[in-house]
C-alpha cells in the first residue's frame, strides 16, 4: 500500500512541477532547455513570500532553538555527526560525478566513502583525509540537469524545506525513483537493518547541522537585509549557479558547504 502511495505522490509531484515549469502568460508550457545567468524567474512571488514567512515562523520556534541546543554539544560530537552526514551524501554525489563526466572525483569519493564507512566507523571519522583523499564538492541531480543544459525554471519556496527551483525539484524526484541509495535502502526496501525512520532522522539532522553552522550568518543576514526574502532568494540562486558552473568563488554570507544542505533538501 505504501509503495502505491509513493507512486501516486511521485506522479502528482511530477505533474505539478511540469505544470509550473515555465508557464507562459497564456498558460502554455515552455520547459526551458538552457539556463539564463543572472535572471530571477520568481513566477509565484506572492505565494512564495507567504510560505517564506511561514518557514521563518517555524524557524524561530523550532529549528533555531534546536540548532542552538545542538551547538551546546561537545565539538567532537558535532564533528562526528557532520562527518557522518557528509559521508552519507556521497551516495548521491558519486553517481552525479559519473553523470557529469567527473570520473576522477567519482573515484576519490568512492574511496572516501568505503574508507570512512569502514575504518571511520560509519563516517564518524574522516580517515580518508588522513590518507590524502581530500573532500570533493558535493553534487546532486539538480546540478547534473543544469550541467546538461536544463534551465532552472521557476523559483519557489516549499513549506519547511525552503528555497528550490523546478530543476532542483526534478532532481529531488530522481532520488525517489532510484537515484539515492540511502533512500532505496531505508524507505523503498525498508530492510531489517534500516527503515524510513533512519532516513528521516538523517534529513532532520542535516537540517539542524546546517542551521547550527549558520546561526550567526542568518542572524546577520536578517539584521542587515532590507528584504530578507530577496536576499535569501539571491543567495540560493547564486550558490546553485556557482556549483553548476564549478566556480570557486565563495558566497559572501554563507560558507561553501552550506546551501547544499538546504536543497535536499
Image (cartoon, grey):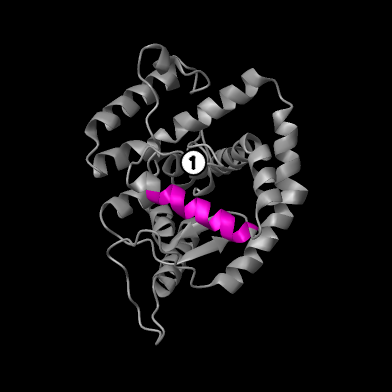
Q: Main structural element of the magenta stretch: helix, strand or loop?
A: helix
Which residue is more in the foreground, 118 or 76?
Answer: 76
| Residue 229 lies in the magenta stretch | yes
Q: Quadrant of residue 80?
A: top right
Which residue is more in the foreground, 223 or 125?
Answer: 223
In terms of secondary structure, where does tag 1 sit?
A: helix
Residue at coordinates 71% horizontally, 25% vertically from top-left?
73
Using the rendered image of the protein, determine whether residue 102 is visible from the camera's viewpoint.
Answer: yes
| Residue 256 horizontal side relative to residue 218, left or right | left
Using the rendered image of the protein, determine whether residue 178 is visible from the camera's viewpoint.
Answer: no
Where residue 89 sits in the image (x, y, percent)? Answer: 44, 36
Relative vertical location of residue 90 with respect to residue 238 in this rendering, above or below: above
| Residue 28 horizontal side relative to residue 192, left or right | left
**Bounds of the magenta span?**
228-241
Where residue 79 sits in the image (x, y, percent)? Answer: 58, 23
| Residue 37 horizontal side relative to residue 258, left or right | left
Where residue 55 sits in the image (x, y, percent)? Answer: 67, 57
Residue at coordinates 34% horizontally, 28% vertically from top-left?
109
Where residue 144 sits in the image (x, y, percent)? Answer: 31, 49
Residue bearing the label numbered 1? 186
Label 1: few (<14), some (14–19) or many (≥20) C-alpha neighbours in 10 Å: some
Q: Quadrant of residue 103?
A: top left
Amino acid at each position: 500500500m505504501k509503495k502505491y502511495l509513493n507512486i501516486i505522490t511521485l506522479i502528482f509531484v511530477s505533474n505539478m512541477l511540469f505544470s509550473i515549469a515555465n508557464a507562459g502568460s497564456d498558460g502554455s508550457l515552455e520547459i526551458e532547455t538552457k539556463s539564463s545567468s543572472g535572471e530571477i524567474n520568481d513566477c509565484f512571488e506572492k505565494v512564495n513570500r507567504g510560505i517564506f514567512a511561514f518557514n521563518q515562523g517555524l524557524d524561530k520556534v523550532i529549528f533555531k532553538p534546536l540548532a542552538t541546543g545542538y551547538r551546546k554539544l561537545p565539538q567532537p560530537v558535532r564533528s562526528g555527526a557532520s562527518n557522518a552526514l557528509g559521508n552519507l551524501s556521497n551516495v548521491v554525489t558519486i553517481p552525479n560525478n559519473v553523470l557529469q563526466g567527473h570520473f576522477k572525483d567519482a573515484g576519490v569519493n568512492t574511496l572516501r566513502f568505503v574508507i570512512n564507512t569502514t575504518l571511520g566507523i560509519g563516517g564518524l571519522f574522516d580517515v580518508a583525509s588522513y590518507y590524502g583523499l581530500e573532500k570533493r564538492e558535493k553534487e546532486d541531480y539538480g546540478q547534473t540537469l543544469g550541467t546538461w543544459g536544463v534551465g532552472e525554471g521557476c523559483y519557489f519556496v516549499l513549506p519547511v524545506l525552503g528555497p528550490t527551483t523546478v530543476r532542483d525539484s526534478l532532481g529531488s524526484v530522481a532520488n525517489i525513483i532510484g537515484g539515492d541509495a540511502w533512500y532505496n535502502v531505508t524507505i523503498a526496501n525498508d530492510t531489517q537493518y534500516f527503515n524510513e525512520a533512519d532516513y528521516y532522522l538523517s534529513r532532520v539532522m542535516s537540517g539542524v547541522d546546517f542551521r547550527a553552522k549558520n546561526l550567526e550568518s542568518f542572524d546577520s543576514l536578517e539584521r542587515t537585509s532590507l528584504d530578507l526574502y530577496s536576499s535569501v532568494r539571491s543567495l540560493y540562486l547564486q550558490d546553485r549557479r556557482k556549483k553548476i558552473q564549478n566556480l570557486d568563488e565563495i558566497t559572501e554570507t554563507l560558507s561553501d558547504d552550506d546551501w547544499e544542505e538546504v536543497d535536499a533538501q
